[in-house]
Image: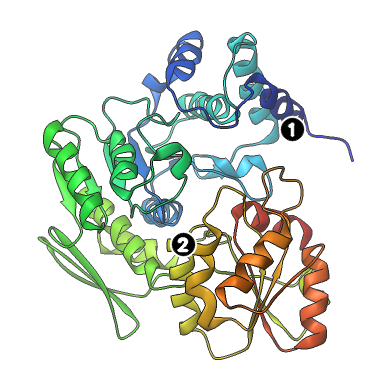
Amino acid sequence: MTKASSDIILDRMMALHPKIIDLTLDRVWRLLHALGNPQNDLPPVIHIAGTNGKGSTQAMFRAGLEAAGKTVHAYTSPHLARFHERIRLAGVLISEDYLTEVLDECYEANGGGPITYFEITTVAAILAFSRVRADYCLLEVGLGGRLDATNILDEPLLTIITPVSLDHTQFLGDTVAKIAGEKAGILKRLRPAIITAQTDDAMEVIEARGEKLGCPMLVQGQHWHVEEERARLIYQDETGLLDLPPPALIGAHQFQNAGTAITALRHLGFDEAACEAACTQVEWPARMQRLADGALTSRAPEAEFWLDGGHNAACAATLAETLTRLPKRPTHLICGLMNTKDVAGYMAPLVPHVSSLQGVSIPGEVNTLPGEDTAKAATEAGIEATIAESVSDAIDVIAQRDPNARILICGSLYLAGAVLRENV
């Protein structure tokens, strides 16, 4: 199969810096300047950081904006099946031709200088956004915030910080407070910020930064409230109460994410219809996604298949809670993680809710945790676990043992992407 032009350029970009992650903004500023500073030509920007929930929050916010008739650029990472998923131009995924054009332009402007893959592709997204008209531009932070390649605006329209927890500790710090300090780096002087509920140590850091910069802050639990009541979403702020349908995305945590998106919509003056659309019209794959019929699911036709890309202990806790909401059914995990993750922390919340685990290595990922290490961590946590050579092999084992099982493939967005590509 012939590679797409964009894939060829993306492969070249991987060789421009020896490290996948090297947090600084100097290289980004250099390339933006070489391109004529396209960040100055973006539509009003909403900048979103956080450890968990930022992608779902962005998706809900976008659904509400688009239902209100607004055109929206959106940037997110990582992608699942194709790089194009990261860049949505005025509501539509970037075309192959235009992606190739902006990637090539960035590659040439960079002049062979050192720059990470994420940095140069983020600049390509900004370049594309600057040349296509839209009402809003939603930028999701890749890692941290303060030194993330998306943090290149002095005056965003709005900033959002979703829940902060331990993740990427080798880059962001080994405490929630240190990580919160990195996330709070997106806050800008006098620019409003929406803050989802945080642990006390995270909130102390974020509020201190916001106060120093004079940011008007809308904090969950102080300025707005959201809860699930009788399978409805109840939201309240100083302008009144909303009684809305539950989020289309499954899990108690999605009520909080919806509340964050609704707060942003209300702050920008949108009505109840937009807030309802944020709940009901949102689509966000690999977040407790029910898998459709395909090459993988056909291997166990009586089974129920789910896919989730959450990859840290907090994600596993929300995943465990979500499993309690589903009808009782033996649940078997097919799990693959990256080698930078807290595997024991991921396993612990899942122990009471699963019957077995098949550990797999993530195909094509040099930084995958070997399947045997995942299985070992699961066994040590108290889950019956074995190793599988592939997801398809794991499905075959589970189908033979328990044909009517619930099969949950989980542990990494990279694994989720491989599954979505294979299950066609």
Q: Nearer the viewer, residue 237 or 146?
A: 146
**Residues under numbered marks 1 and 2 in contact, where contact means CB atoms less than 8 Å apart:** no
Which corner quadrant of the image does residue 347 belong to?
bottom right
In the drawing, does residue 384 fall left or right of residue 69? right
Q: Quadrant of residue 388?
A: bottom right
The residue that disc 1 covers is 7
For the point 47% across and 19% down, the residue is 28
Q: Report x, y in % for residue 174.
A: 38, 45
Tell me the kind of residue under disc 1: Asp
Q: Residue at x 18, y 37 (%)?
A: 209
Cα separation, mark 1 vs mark 2, equals: 33 Å
293 lies left or right of 56: right
The residue beneath circle 2 is 313
Image spot of residue 421 (x, y percent): 74, 55
Element at label 1: helix
Q: Of tags 1 and 2, which is closer to the observer?
A: 2
Is residue 165 shown above or below 248? above
Snapshot quadrant of residue 371: bottom right
Residue 212 numbered tag: none
Callout 2 crowding tier (Cα within 10 Å): few <14, some 14–19, many ≥20: many
- Does 352 sit above or below residue 254? below
Helix, strand or loop at label 2? It is: helix
Q: Residue at 24%, 49% (x, y): give it.
A: 194
